[in-house]
């Protein structure tokens, strides 16, 4: 191996370790940090971002990349040459963005996240405007800079931050097809549910410690390694942390245990991906998770495909009854299954079902694209949100807390992130169908709370491949074809209309 | 101001922010991190240490220091010229230690701390030997390197890490005087206590949540700002965290509330120092706390001087009764006062009283000096510990858990740290006496749970001065003379023999 390649791996290892440090700080900010520390935390995060950026844009890297490109030993090794490809991508996209902008974006998003918490609680969009305006201004600068080096539109340059090679043009096509499919089937699904009568939520209150114990039990069943991770509480559930230290969070509602539980199941899907990445390429770009669509596919595969299946509910029903001393018809398996597959247009994305979820994403995708492309201002956004919500979901939120203030993504600078949720939902359906075909015992095992056949297949086909291939290459290797909406549509039809 | 000085402040600000990041990671390691993450955490901590070391030893700094030294504007400003003095000290002592050694020490101490937790629980000194041997080997290398540049002995070079300009020669003199004084008074104190009869510990169990609420109430009374700090749990109480994010910990004993409570009072003394440092010089060397003797003086002033005074106990007694629904003679003020000023030779340093505490320190000071000066091996240490414990305290621990395994300091590389505790106790006595002379209302205010006159005086005389002066200069400004043992001896005599 050339010394150039060795130098690159050393440099990227340092970048990876600094990334882990940021992961811990971000977890701490969301779960633990006292409110008065926000400015100081902003300093810490922005200095780390800046130092990472300096290390990544160091001009030596260009020389090393050139030298390593002509290294026959590297070229002969698929993992190492993929690592080189990922290093190159990161170096050149980072070079496009000046140091000051990196630092300013890190600081502004941290400040805005904290303002968002209060603004959401008070349903006060105006309170968020100044800091979100600053974030949007900086994100647009980043978009313009990345767009130039990638040779794509500014919005595509933002998409590419989360899902390499994603393009709005392809998303438009997929989302168009999906919107039309869902527009057709949603009335039929709602009608069918009406005929069957409404399932009943078991009566609470559900003590928080019992909800937490239940979540932990499910995480263990799924294979989460608690010696290398944690479960905590935050305003917005997430999966974060660091290598060998994967931390998920949820939020508890005393009146409805399904909210925290399915948050846990979702984040555990993310966490298993992180915990099962190949240790051999730890801290290297090729050893990290593929883009966010694949990441979301892992969470949605667990939350939606596996854990709302009839088989899983068969396993879960007695566990739930035991967890909450549940008795009576609300706790019957059939009622719980219908509750967990209830389709109901609502305001909150993270609480919505898998049939209406894509509408929440299409709404955000259209609005954030309009913001980036200067076709919409932040002041106009609440109105536009409500109009589009009426169009896509048939209802408009009564206040911004239940509308445009519900998500942390924009305050934290994540413009371009939302589409990956629905790309992830489709990827999940395609992967789950292929997994069941390859290992027909999966549904029956889920019925016993045994996730090992499913997780074993995912380890081989997804987790263990890290960033070796592109998302579509990985999907082709695992399922026989690149991403399309067929498996998702077949799943919706099978679960809700047969 | 010269651009050289501006460049220095910018560089040191980055160092300060990285130090804050390390503070959060260290807190997380001790309170939160899952056990399987220890290697990954080791990577994070050692990379941050290494990057700090690289930034601090950058050869530009020498040039900037030279240029700033001839800057008349800097010279005319006491704070800025003190800042320059501290920068110079840090740069040249850091230059003495090679990058690889910094990284190796950081990694070895983190690994050893984790081994220590298990070894202490199992009372298994042998289990600690390999990793502690590695720590000691590296600390000796650091000592040799620093000794050369400072022109002092290796042990003095370690002392200087925690208390700038401290020398074993002066410590020998002070500790000699103190050992002789305490050897004289201890029998008299014990005899007097015997005559009065033994105070009684109120019967538990004391629920942990009530103990925590009591600790928080006391922290509030003392002026701890919870919007910029936290109280948590760890094996060994400490004060850590970051700017505007000062995090103290304690450990709870269900059978004895005084252990956690006085841990909290102690760490709150540290925390107030950190929270009251001058914001204007945040992240600059001159804006940090003076050496560890002064830091320990702040914790011991609270724990020992203020919070075991008759006046404080008058305030605390009804608060304690209310906290634990206490009834009966054990909860009487006089019994509680005698309990909180009970002198009793014991095994555990952190649980010992202020009369026998110095013996614990003198023991560790002699042993660690012998280790550094190759007059003792780690294998011989448990025996030497027990012998010296018999000499100084009149008792030897029945096992190493209660003996040489009780403290985290050596596993975490803190050779040279222990003496600062007793220097701190003497500094505390000297400061508290001066405070009461300057503000005679202090005792009566403590009797009402009002710490503001005391903390106000400390803010002006200690906290607000940060590292503007040397410890002795600060003490002279605040009390009229440099450190000596007189005030401490007078305090012991007044509290225990009159």
Image (spheres, coloured by chain):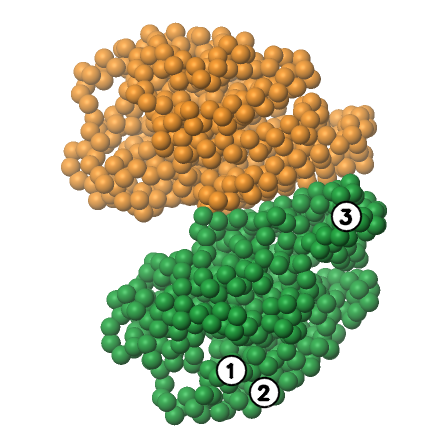
Chain colours: A green, B orange
Callout 1–callout 3 Cβ contact below 8 Å: no
Q: Secondary structure at mark 2?
A: helix
Q: Which residue is at a point 38% across and 65% down the rendered structure image?
A: A449
Residue labelled with disc 3: A73
Point out the frontmost of discs 1 and 3.
3
Q: CA distance from mark 1 to mark 3?
A: 47 Å
Callout 2–callout 1 Cβ contact below 8 Å: yes
Q: Quadrant of the C terminus of chain A?
A: bottom left
Please report whichever mark, 2 or 1, sits nearer to the chain's N-terminal start. 2
Residue labelled with disc 1: A492
Task: Inspect this view and state whether residue B324 appears.
Answer: yes
Please report whichever mark, 3 or 2, sits nearer to the chain's N-terminal start. 3
Q: Identify the chain of the residue marked 1, using the numbered disc in the image.
A: A
Q: Which residue is at a point 75% across and 32% down the rendered structure image?
A: B58
Discs 1 and 3 lie in a common subunit: yes
Residue A226 location (% of width, % of height) = 44, 51
Q: Secondary structure at mark 1?
A: helix
Q: Identify the chain of the residue marked 2, using the numbered disc in the image.
A: A
Q: CA distance from mark 3 to mark 2?
A: 49 Å
Using the image, tell me which numbered label, if any, was put on residue B363: none
Please report whichever mark, 1 or 3, sits nearer to the chain's N-terminal start. 3
Residue labelled with disc 2: A181
Along the line of sight, the residue nearer the viewer: B46 or B160: B46
Residue A353 location (% of width, % of height) = 48, 77
Along the line of sight, the residue nearer the viewer: A425 or B470: A425
Q: Secondary structure at mark 3?
A: helix
């Amino acid at each position: 191996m050339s010394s150039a390649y060795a130098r690159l791996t050393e440099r990227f290892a340092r970048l990876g370790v600094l990334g882990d440090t940021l992961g811990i700080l971000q977890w701490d900010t969301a779960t633990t940090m006292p409110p008065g520390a926000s400015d100081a935390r902003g300093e810490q995060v922005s200095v780390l971002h800046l130092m990472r950026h300096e290390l990544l844009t160091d001009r030596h890297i260009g020389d090393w990349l050139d030298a390593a490109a002509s290294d026959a030993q590297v070229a002969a090794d698929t993992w190492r040459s993929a690592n080189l490809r990922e290093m190159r991508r990161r170096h050149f996209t980072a070079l496009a963005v000046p140091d000051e902008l990196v630092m300013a974006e890190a600081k502004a998003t941290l400040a805005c996240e904290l303002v968002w918490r209060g603004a959401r609680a008070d349903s006060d969009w105006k309170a968020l405007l100044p800091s979100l305006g600053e974030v949007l201004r900086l994100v647009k600068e980043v978009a313009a800079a990345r767009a130039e080096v990638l040779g794509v539109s500014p919005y595509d340059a933002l998409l590419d931050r989360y899902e390499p090679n994603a393009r709005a043009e392809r998303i438009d096509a997929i989302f168009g097809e999906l919107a039309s499919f869902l527009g057709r089937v949603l009335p039929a699904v709602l009608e069918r549910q009406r005929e069957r009568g409404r399932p009943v939520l078991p009566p609470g209150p559900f003590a928080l410690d019992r909800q937490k114990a239940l979540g932990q039990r499910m995480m263990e069943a799924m294979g989460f390694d608690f010696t290398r991770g944690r479960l905590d509480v935050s305003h917005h559930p997430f999966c974060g942390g660091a290598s060998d230290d994967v931390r998920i969070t949820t939020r508890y509602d005393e009146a409805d245990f399904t909210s925290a539980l399915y948050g846990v199941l979702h984040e555990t899907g993310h966490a298993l991906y992180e915990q099962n990445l190949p240790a051999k390429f730890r801290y290297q770009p090729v050893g990290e998770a593929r883009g966010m669509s694949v990441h979301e596919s892992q969470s949605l595969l667990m939350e939606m495909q596996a854990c709302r299946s009839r088989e899983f509910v068969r396993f879960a029903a007695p566990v739930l009854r035991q967890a909450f001393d549940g008795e009576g018809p609300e706790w019957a398996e059939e009622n719980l299954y219908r509750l967990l597959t209830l389709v109901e247009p609502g305001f909150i994305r993270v609480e919505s079902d898998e049939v209406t979820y894509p509408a929440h994403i299409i709404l955000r995708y259209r609005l954030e694209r309009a913001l980036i492309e200067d076709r919409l201002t932040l002041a106009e956004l609440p109105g536009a949100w409500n109009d589009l919500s009426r169009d896509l979901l048939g209802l408009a939120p009564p206040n911004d807390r239940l509308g445009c203030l519900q998500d942390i993504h924009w305050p934290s600078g994540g413009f371009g992130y939302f589409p990956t949720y629905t790309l992830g939902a489709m990827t999940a359906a395609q992967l789950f169908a292929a997994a069941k075909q390859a290992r027909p015992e999966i549904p029956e095992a889920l019925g016993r709370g045994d996730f090992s056949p499913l997780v074993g297949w995912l380890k081989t086909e997804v987790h263990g491949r890290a960033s070796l291939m592109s998302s579509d290459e990985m999907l082709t290797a695992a399922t026989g074809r690149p991403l399309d909406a067929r498996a998702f549509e077949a799943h919706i039809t099978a679960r809700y209309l047969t």
